[in-house]
Amino acid sequence: MKYSQEANKTSVTEFVILGFSDNPDINLVLFVFFLLVYILTVLGNFLLILVIVVDPALHTPMYFFLRNLSFLDLCYTSVTVPKMLANLLSDSKTISFASCAMQMFFFLFFGITECFLLASMAYDRYSAICNPLRYTAIMNKKVCLQLIGGSWVCGTLAAVEHTSLLFTLPFCGPNTINHFFCDILAVLKLVCGNTYWIEIQIILGTGFFLLMPLLMSLLSYVAIISTILKIKTAEGRHRAFSTCSSHLIVVTLCYGTALITYARPKSSYGMGEVKIFSLFYSVGIAVLNPIIYSFQNKEVKNALRKIPITFF
């Protein structure tokens, strides 16, 4: 445990990430499992990006957003998983103060950006289903770039606010993070003094950055479902719903686990429960997204069949 002395105060200069278990055999099994999951995540999302880039039929706003979603998933998992894999095989599970702050910043940055991107994708589906004749005019290139840019700006603001708020507080020890990465709630427990109001600020801030895009998505889907129900034929309703079913599944998984984890006081659940939910939204969703969009989407499946022809 390392500390530095400043004005008779002791401040932490590095943290120890507790991880999952102290048993080397269990950690080895977890290492193999998460390594395979990470490889599948990288390959799946990279393949989806490649398919969208090389197939002209997928050069539409919907797949433009999907390509950005896959890129965010690659970045999102790469923030936490490589360090987690290293810690599973290492006796020293330390991370410097600055590296912990950086990890938290980019985790929040990519996570919140993805939430707003999902809201942009919901708006895209709303425009396609509720205003089909004006769709190309509404979702032009400029609008798509503005939605993407807005998502990244919101992610940046959220990450800067939360990281700066937390890491300007005093850390006097202990320095053990009961998690597998520098999660905001786990690090908050190590702050000196009463953190009640800081916790409230973080919960309200996180809730805002999660609930605002969620509300945008919900409003879009209320209009989408209302429009679909007005379609007279069952085939027409099925065809309209199939264009947004993949996105609806991803939105439900993403927001569901994130809200359960962050939108309630830390005293209401144990860290074991937090780790499970954190694994799902930080690792599980990223590996599931390419699978969900591939199996639910005929255009993607057709494009996947063309890849060998394109390159050979």
Image (tube, helix red, strand yellow):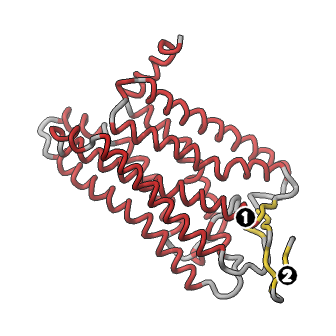
List the residue tagged with mark 2.
Answer: 5
Q: In front here: 8 or 246?
A: 8
Res 246 quadrant in image: top left
- Residue occupying the point 30% across, 45% down: 124
- Residue occupying the point 53% across, 68% down: 262
- Residue occupying the point 85% across, 81% down: 5
- Report the amino acid beneath label 2: Gln
Q: Is residue 14 above or below residue 252?
A: below
Q: Position of residue 137 (x, y in %)?
A: 21, 41
Q: In front here: 72 or 88?
A: 72
**Crowding at label 1, few (<14), some or many (≥20) Cα neighbours within 10 Å?**
few
Q: In front here: 118 or 234?
A: 118
Answer whether residue 240 is visible to the viewer in this image: yes
Earlier along the polypeptide chain: callout 2 or callout 1?
2
Q: Position of residue 169 (x, y in %)?
A: 66, 79
List the residue tagged with mark 1.
Answer: 98
Res 198 quadrant in image: bottom right
